[in-house]
Image (cartoon, rainbow, N blue to C red):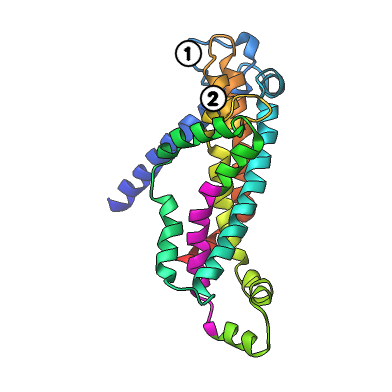
Amino acid sequence: MGRVFRNVFLGICVVLWIAPLWLLVVNTIAPADTYAEDSPQWWPDGFGLLGNLARAWTEAGIGAGFANSVLYAVVCSAVAVLIATMAGFAVVVLPVRRPVLWFWFIYSGTLFPLQMFLAPLFGMYAESDLYDTQLGLGLVYVALAIPFAFFVVRNQLTTIPAELTEAAQLDGASWWRIFGSIHLPLMRTAMLAAFAFQFTWVWNDLLFGITLARSPQVTPVMAALASLSGNYGSVPTPVILTGALIVSIPTIAIFLGFQRAFARGIGASL
């Protein structure tokens, strides 16, 4: 009886998970010109994926936003992880005073809701000409990505024996040499895990993308997708769903490519 109940429960879970995915696939490949907007399709009546893809990429501006998000997600996440690793090395390895206070000072950046930064950032950016620039948006992404990356990297740094540092110091190695030759290679999995986390966050950001930018040359892809989905009257639903499918591909690729390093890095940081 217990086995039957378990199988029925698992079957219900599979159906609940498959149903929206099936609807997404069927309505994404439906031809936009013949699509009935009043009800979703449960079965495909044609193949219009390539046409929907072309319209979402060019007419709706997904292409420019996609390129901007690739720049923000790759560069800003990499810079944030590198800075977080150096900060973690300083807090854990270097002989600084009150390392716990420094840890909480940096990590506290993850404890506050992001909405509280919007008004001060908007006013400051408007006065300093950083508003609606790639540099301004990139600085925000780097700054907000550092605290959590610091948390992941710092936790793994605490597992590295202090004897390694002491032995390197006895051999006359400088702090930069100890960081670059010993700790940086040992931190590779934690850095990759932190990069995967921050890439996903920057890629999926909508809040700062629509607040601190407005031109197509600067706005990230989620802001372009939001403007596309907010225009149901002129853009067919298959084109909107195709745009959503396009913007999901990089995060899926990052997860599949980094899953082994992600699991090992998170496991070592807990």
Is 161 magenta? The answer is yes
Residue beneath disc 2: 226
Outermost bottom residue? 170
Magenta segment's dominant SS is helix
Q: Residue at x 53, y 44 (%)?
A: 201
Q: Is residue 243 visible?
A: yes
Where residue 185 appears, as percent x and y from the top left, is: 66, 70
Question: What type is the residue that disc 1 sits on?
Answer: Ser
**Front in this rendered view, residue 39 or 170:** 170
Residue 43 visible in the snapshot: no
Q: Comparing marks 2 and 1, which lies closer to the viewer?
A: 2
Residue 248: where, in percent of width, then height? Answer: 59, 36
Residue at position x 34%, y 43% in the image: 9
Disc 2 and disc 1 in contact, CB within 8 angstroms = no
The crowding category of the residue bearing disc 2, from other C-alpha atoms within 10 Å (few below 14, some 14 to 19, many at least 20), is some
Task: Write the residue at 68% across / 87% down.
Answer: 172
Identify which residue, 221 or 236, lies in the foreground. Answer: 221
Instruction: Write down the quadrant of residue 65 in the picture.
Output: top right
210 in relation to 141, above or below: above
Q: Which residues are magenta?
A: 143-162
On the image, the x and y values in percent for residue 250 come to 64, 41
Residue beneath disc 1:
39
Q: CA distance from mark 2 to mark 1?
A: 21 Å
